[in-house]
Amino acid sequence: MSSIVINTPNGTIGRKVADALLDAGESLTVISRTADKAAALTERGAKLVEGSIDDAAVIKAAFDGADRLFWLTPPAGYRPDYHEWSVKAAEQAAALASEAGIKHVVVLSSVGAHSGRGTGPVGCLLEVEEAFKAKIPHVTILRPGFFFENLFRDQMTIQTMGKIFSPAPGDKKFPMIGTDDIAAAAVDALRGTGDGHQVLGLHGPEDLTYTELAKQLSEAWGREVSFVQVGLEDARGAMVGAGLPQFAADIFVEMYDAMLKGAMDPAEARDEATTTPSTFRDFAKNVFVPALAGASA
């Protein structure tokens, strides 16, 4: 029986993909460093291979009998050598996937990946894409825009001050998307057969400026929220002051600098294929505002 492997089943997107695949009756193998975190999936029938995605023995065990793979690079801040580690792990996984006979890999990448190094946490993703393309006949690369859910990083300042602080430009439109739509696209791709090497931008229903995003949030919440652009060094200091490791703060500041320079603009034009249905207005009303209410209860 064919099966699908997910290398990061415990994060927001990986868990949504895993649940949807199990709902669809797919045979699923998940890799997790701790069994407890994946317990909800194994209780539903997923096979667990316990260990790290940079361990060749773990990867070989997970890939045994599989024909498809969903590969998501773990988030930045995981380790100081994030870029090098991420690329090395992908290169090893690609080689072992080829040896195992896996024919189709869906890679979650990002808007801006085409720019390569110098784009913060996105900077390793072009090399991750290329690693799988070099070894696997069918590779579907998903490059989503900025996540609606990233707004949770600003929940405290929104809650207490009614403000979103960021070095990002307030008047420039960016593609913004919810993780539900990203997961749905990944599931659709994984359940397909693949068609060579493809890149699919995922841009949400519309491009938004951060000022527009703040306005839509204000309307959903019934309280004014404004966007405040801050300098790169101010942002770096704030992140470190909030407890983020220096290396992680540096990575994110590099991404914001890339945004200001246009390196995070999408390489794929918005069209029917890249446009997804879930709106920020609905996310704000149904997800974010209830979270604000829960935090203040």
Image (cartoon, rainbow, N blue to C red):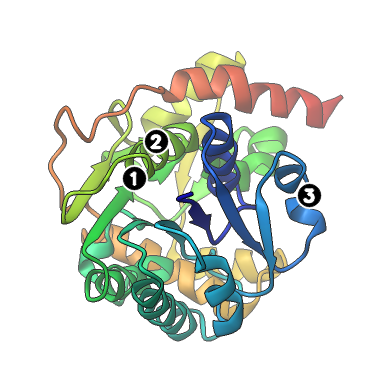
Q: Which residue in the structure is indicated by mark 3?
A: 39
> Decide: marks 2, 1 in contact (CB < 8 A)?
yes
Identify the secondary structure beneath mark 3: helix
In terms of sequence position, does the residue under pointer 3 or pointer 1 come before the other?
3
Upstream in the sequence, badge 2 or badge 3? 3
Image height check: is 247 above or below 178?
Answer: below
Label 2 to label 1: alpha-carbon separation: 6 Å
Mark 3 residue type: Ala
> Mark 2 sits on what residue?
177
The residue at which mark 1 appears reads as 145
Q: Which mark is residue 126?
A: none
What residue lies at 20% left-to-right and 52% top-to-bottom?
Answer: 199
Category of crowding for the residue at label 1, using alpha-carbon neighbours closer than 10 angstroms: few (below 14), some (14–19), many (at least 20): many
* Up-down relation of residue 183 to residue 267 (above or below): above
Is residue 234 or residue 133 the one in the foreground? Answer: 133
Image coordinates of residue 162 in percent, x first then y, are 62, 32
Residue at the location (61% across, 57% down)? 30
Is residue 171 among what the camera can see?
no
Q: Local crowd at mark 3 within 10 Å, few (<14), some, or many (≥20)?
A: some
**Rounded to the nearest whole Å, what is the CA distance between mark 2 and mark 3?**
28 Å
Q: Position of residue 219 (x, y in %)?
A: 51, 14
Residue type marked 1: Gly
Q: Is residue 169 above or below residue 63?
A: above
For the C terminus, give its image quadrant: top right
Q: Residue at (41%, 32%) from the top-left corner?
A: 181
User: Marks 3/1: CA distance?
Assistant: 30 Å
